[in-house]
Image: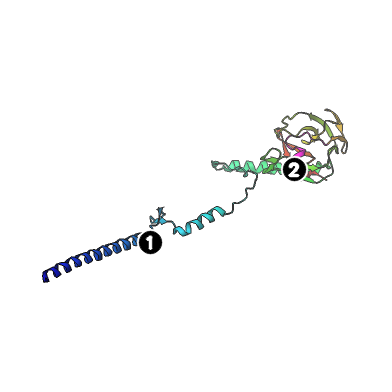
């Protein structure tokens, strides 16, 4: 009788222990699953090495969207069309040092040029060929940007603003030595100034009237007096198109140095 009771109790105990052990195992599995799904932190992404050799890391993922949004919304600077940079006129190679003889010769030539120019200024006086403001000044050293040619270049004369059809008058007494109706090169100056009249005034001085209409009032060989009408302002200059630079007379002065003519600032000879 006692043995049967013990056997029954032993069987009941084994059955209860099995269920307890099963419950404990299920709890361990559940805790492990929760740990791996919520408790383990996510590794940060490595993007490379910075200059010091330390790996850079991206910000936490909850900030990635903010960074991307900032990069997307960064303002873009407006694109401004500007003339190309002024080309450099400096030479890459250094010139050899001048000798005392060369320096003395250069100083002597400079003094002679200054004396000759001073004499020319005192003798040669001109009047403005047309009335108007100077739209583009003379400069044979510094580059100016040409809107018509879309390039940087020197300007060997002055542009005087005036209407198309304005009468152009001889700046001084002289003789007509050239009338150019094609874009020819004159005295090594630039071509493209349109219909041009050249007047020689003696003493190595000449005046040039460009961008004229085809209604030229003089012919080669004519003697003209100061103030005499020689033509009218037109729109014949390709280099200084009226549609881009406005209507004007291109006026230049040439002076003879040795065997060639070079440009000079017309303003220094004007009364």
**Quadrant position of residue 2:** bottom left
Q: Which residue is mark 2?
A: 265
Relative to residue 240, is residue 219 drawn left or right?
Answer: right
> Which is more toward the observer, 222 or 81?
81
Residue 174 location, quadrant: top right
Task: Tell me which corner region of the image, top left, top right, bottom left or bottom right, holds residue 3.
Answer: bottom left
Residue 178 is left or right of residue 83, and the answer is right
Of 239 and 95, the residue lying toward us: 239
Residue nearest the viewer, comparing 223 with 9: 9
Badge 1 density bin: few <14, some 14–19, many ≥20, Cα 10 Å: few
Counting the numbered discs, the total is 2
Residue shown at 48% from the left, 59% from the top = 63
Task: Indicate whether residue 182 is drawn in magenta.
Answer: no
Residue at image location 22% in from the left, 63% down from the top = 18
Q: Residue placed at 53% from the left, 55% from the top?
A: 69
Question: Could you tell me if residue 90 is visible in this image?
Answer: yes
SS at mark 1 in the image: helix
User: What x and y, as percent, mark residue 182?
Assistant: 76, 28
Scheme of image coloration: rainbow
For this view, does 13 lie left or right of residue 180?
Answer: left
Q: Position of residue 263 (x, y in %)?
A: 72, 38
- Mark before the other along the chain sequence, 1 or 2: 1
Q: Which residue corresponds to mark 1?
A: 38
Element marked by disc 2: loop
User: Which residues fall within the magenta stretch?
Assistant: 233-244
Position of the N terminus, as image quadrant, is: bottom left
In depth, the one of 198 and 27 nearer the eye is 27
Q: Is residue 202 visible?
A: no
From mark 1 to mark 2, how far is it between C-alphas? Answer: 87 Å
Query: In front: mark 1 or mark 2?
Result: 1
In the rendered image, residue 239 lying in the magenta stretch gets the answer yes
Relative image position of residue 266 (x, y in whole percent): 77, 42
């Amino acid at each position: 009788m006692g043995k049967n009771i013990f056997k029954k109790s032993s069987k009941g105990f084994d059955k209860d222990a099995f269920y307890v052990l099963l419950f404990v195992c299920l709890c361990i599995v559940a805790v492990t699953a929760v740990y791996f799904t919520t408790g383990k932190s996510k590794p940060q992404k490595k993007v490379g090495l910075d200059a010091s050799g330390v790996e850079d890391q991206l910000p936490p993922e909850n900030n990635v969207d903010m960074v991307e949004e900032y990069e997307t919304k960064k303002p873009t600077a407006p694109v401004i069309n500007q003339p190309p940079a002024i080309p450099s006129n400096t030479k890459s190679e250094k010139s050899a040092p001048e000798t005392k003889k060369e320096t003395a010769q250069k100083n002597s030539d400079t003094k002679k040029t200054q004396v000759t120019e001073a004499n020319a200024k005192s003798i040669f006086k001109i009047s403005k060929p047309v009335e108007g403001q100077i739209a583009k000044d003379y400069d044979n050293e510094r580059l100016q940007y040409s809107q018509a040619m879309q390039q940087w270049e020197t300007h060997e004369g002055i542009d005087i603003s005036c209407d198309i059809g304005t009468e152009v008058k001889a700046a001084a007494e002289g003789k007509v030595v050239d009338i150019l109706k094609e874009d020819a090169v004159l005295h090594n100056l630039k071509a493209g100034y349109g219909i041009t009249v050249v007047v020689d005034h003696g003493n190595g001085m000449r005046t040039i009237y460009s961008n004229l209409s085809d209604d030229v009032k003089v012919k080669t060989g004519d003697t003209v007096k100061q103030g005499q009408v020689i033509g009218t302002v037109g729109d014949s200059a390709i280099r200084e198109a009226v549609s881009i630079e406005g209507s004007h007379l291109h006026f230049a002065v040439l002076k003879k140095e040795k065997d060639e003519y070079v440009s000079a600032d017309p303003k220094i000879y004007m009364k």
